[in-house]
Amino acid sequence: MDSIPLNLVMWIAAVAPIVVLMILMLGLQWGAAKAAPVGLVIALISGIVLYKAPANLLLWEGLKGLWSAVTVLLVVWPAILIYEVSDHVGAFKVFRAGMQKFTPNELLQIIIIGWVFVSFLQGITGFGVPVAVGAPLLVGLGVHPLFAVIIPLIGHAWGNTFGTLAVAWDQLVATTGIAGQSLLATAAWAAVFIWVWNAITGIAICWFYGGAKALKKGAPAVIIISLIQAGGQLALSQVNQTLACFVPCCVALVVSVLLGRTGLYNKPWRVEDSKLMDRTKTAEASADDMPKGMGMMQAFFPYILLTVITLVVLLIQPIKNFLGQVKIGFGVPETVTGYGYVNGAAALYSPVSILTHAFTFLLLSSLIGYFYFMKHGWADAKGFGKVLKLSFKETAPSAIAVIAFLMMSRIMGGTGQTVVLARGIAQVLGKGYAVLAPVVGMLGSFMTSSNMASNVLFGEFQLETARLLNFNPAPILGAQTAGGAIGNTICPGNIILGTTTAGILGQEGLVLRKILPLTVTAAVIVGVILFLTLVVF
């Protein structure tokens, strides 16, 4: 057992990298590539001077962070490639025109892509794919690049616990050992808390688009979609957690398209002065000639292929098991700080099943998609070299930020700084800790760029805290993973994915400034509900 002293100096040292990052990114508007290395240096100094981390521990934790960054960049590059392939042939002009056939209501178009479709992607793939794919699709609809990043960030996050076929949920169960009725109770609480965020998501998208006017127009769609997505997830969480997110997402996708055919949304409607839209680009796109003979389904072919490949590989268990045998990773030894804080050894640290990874799905979809466009005369062999070169060029600048962020998070976690952060909050607040329990989950996601990692990092801590405070563990653990889901909106890795694929790399601070008030408010609302449930009633 570690004996890290829990005092004000140690806590301030642990929180310092995060505070400095917030000041640099929110206050001074630094891009992630400039701010992240500063946070990394502060975490290293704290780890060496105060947390007694030996050189070998820092080396191995740094390598873990580097490896995590590689897995993120493996999604970034092919996500940009699939976008560039489609953009090269003018598919987004056709796509934008085709969306008019589903619904001429501009707000519903944005809801379908920025909330419903990215949620569908989260339900089956995750790992940042919804943001990486959703952002350029929204740009293609004429959404301003800044909001094209913000919308999928908030739109996909509700599916982060039971999405990706419940990977984050499974880790919470494995870390805490919950089973039987406790497991079902925790799943129910998690789904209820996530419903709060899901509803806020729909409301926020409408508000960003056109304030009260858009909220009134979008309310029927938001209510119906939220009932299907979050309500369906709540119901299925008591039956099959693996499919609790994916199945409602499939239903919501179909229903949202059908909504466009109803009297509510089948007539042209848009807010002319919407701050969410870039009207200049929209006008330019409509004036250009579209690729001759290309229909909506053909324009969307690479993304349809991406969906089909993902579904076949991940839902057909024999295929998934066979392809999943190929794993890439490296072994790590046990490391210990001077205070006895242990990082366990692993024969294969965070292995990547490369044939079932989003990288492979995106790459295959890009390559096959380009050959499909060539076959129909919309592209030629020479053009592919240009597309490939452009995708590499756009990916490279994000590498520094991703690597620095994830190395910082691993060093903070490996030296015990992250745990001290959470313990300090719990010790000071006592029973009032219930209000900030989801904030701890959110903090974990921010630090690790993963709800799954947040559950691994803080799941056991939340369980022990609940027992010490004589709380029912189920709602506390539900708040942990719900907070982790909310926190995915502010994960540096996800933000960088969005800014890279939307073409606004360097504006991460502005994205964070727009989103942070919303996410913190949502986490506190969940915390207040938790406090009222456990302490007041």
Image: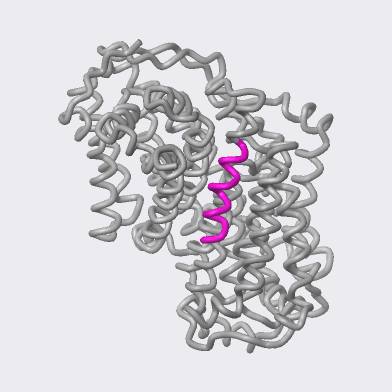
458 left or right, relative to 389 = left
Of residue 308 and residue 302, the one placed in the foreground of this image is 308
Query: Which quarter of the figure is the N terminus placed in?
Result: top left
Query: Which quarter of the figure is the C terminus placed in?
Result: top left
Tell me, yes or no, if residue 63 can be seen here: no
- Whether 198 is among the magenta residues is yes
The residue stretch that appears in magenta: 187-200
Q: Is the magenta stretch mostly helix, strand or loop?
A: helix
Residue at screen point 67% across, 49% down: 362
Where's residue 493, x and y in %? 46, 46
Where's residue 288, x and y in %? 65, 85
Where's residue 98, x and y in %? 74, 77
Q: How is the image coloured?
A: one colour
236 left or right, relative to 471 = right
Where's residue 309, x and y in %? 78, 46
Q: Is residue 229 above or below residue 504?
A: above
Q: Is residue 96 above or below residue 123?
A: below
- Whether 207 is among the magenta residues is no
